[in-house]
Image (tube, rainbow, N blue to C red):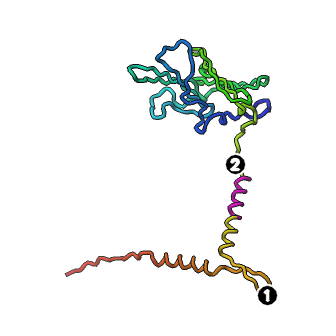
Amino acid sequence: MSDGSGVINLAALGDSDGYLERFKSIPSENIPANTELLLSFSPCLPFSEPEDFVGTDCLDVAACLIVRHRKNNRFVSRYINYGRHEGNEFQYNDSIKTLSVAYPVLSNSHPQTIAHYHCSPNHSIAFSQRFGGDVPLEIRVDSPCACPNACALEDVGPGTIFLIMLCLSATAYFILGSCALRPFRTSSGVQIAPEESLWCMLCYLFTERKEKRPHRRRYSLKEETL
């Protein structure tokens, strides 16, 4: 946060695909009985809904509202862009431990979705029932990951990569040493010598593979003159 209290990792709130909610049925006032509202929302990653339809209004969005009507025993769906990541605004209230993020449809437009991420030991998601027009859809998320530095991303740095390479090299060294070297006892003590059977087998396999390579025959065409 800007006050130095830490970092809130919003990506940790979503699933493996980045969705906080996917096709979530949300309540709303003044909608017909044959209409259902569904919401797909991703706090950090833009998505498109549906994925296989290019002409959709929900293209690279943060929130997509699906209005599904039941007509003649089938559903007709309409996809509405309800906020993007571009141009969103962040506001943190330290007294109530809540981060509010506004997602506008356009970079300079009125936000259509406002998500309130509240630092809490419990996990719950609630939606406002009155929205539309100039009234944005509000989402309240209670989660431990909404607390600063609670669910920070683990970065694989150069030190971790060096340790992994060191462990792999040590493992390969001991495996190769146990297979390719043979200890034996002499009058001066225990000595280690190369295992002849292993090295001879490797040389034999290499030689056998080389001998089995097919030889290409070369043909030359000669013109005969009469």
How many discs mark residues in the rendered view? 2
> In which quadrant will I find the C terminus?
bottom left
Quick check: is 162 in the magenta stretch?
A: yes
For marks 2 and 1, the one nearer the N-term is: 2
The residue that appears at 71% across and 24% down in the rendered structure is 91
> Percent x, y for residue 63?
57, 27
Mark 2 burial class by Cα count in 10 Å: few <14, some 14-19, many 20+: few
Q: Is residue 178 above or below residue 29?
A: below
Please tell me in which quadrant of the rendered image residue 187 appears. bottom right
Nearer to the camera, 173 or 30: 30
Q: Picture quarter containing residue 54?
A: top left
**SS for dot 2:** loop
Q: Secondary structure at mark 1?
A: loop
The residue pinned by badge 1 equals 187
Name the residue: 61% across, 18% down: 136
Q: Which residue does the image show at 54% across and 79% down from the upper left?
A: 204
Judge from the rendering whether residue 47 lies leftward or rightward of residue 143; answer left or right: left
The image shows residue 209 at horizontal and vertical percentages of 49, 75
Q: Is residue 223 left or right of residue 192?
A: left
Please identify the residue farthest to the left as the structure is shown.
Answer: 226
The alpha-carbon separation of the residues under discs 2 and 1 comes to 51 Å
Which residue, given by chain and number where applicable, does mark 2 sit on? 156
Depth check: 107 or 123 in front? 123
Image quadrant containing the N terminus: top right
Provide the major secondary structure of the magenta segment.
Answer: helix
2 vs 1, front mark: 1
* Three-letter code for the amino acid on which mark 2 is drawn: Val
Residue occupying the far top of the picture:
30
Residue type at mark 1: give it: Ser
Q: Which residues are magenta?
A: 159-170
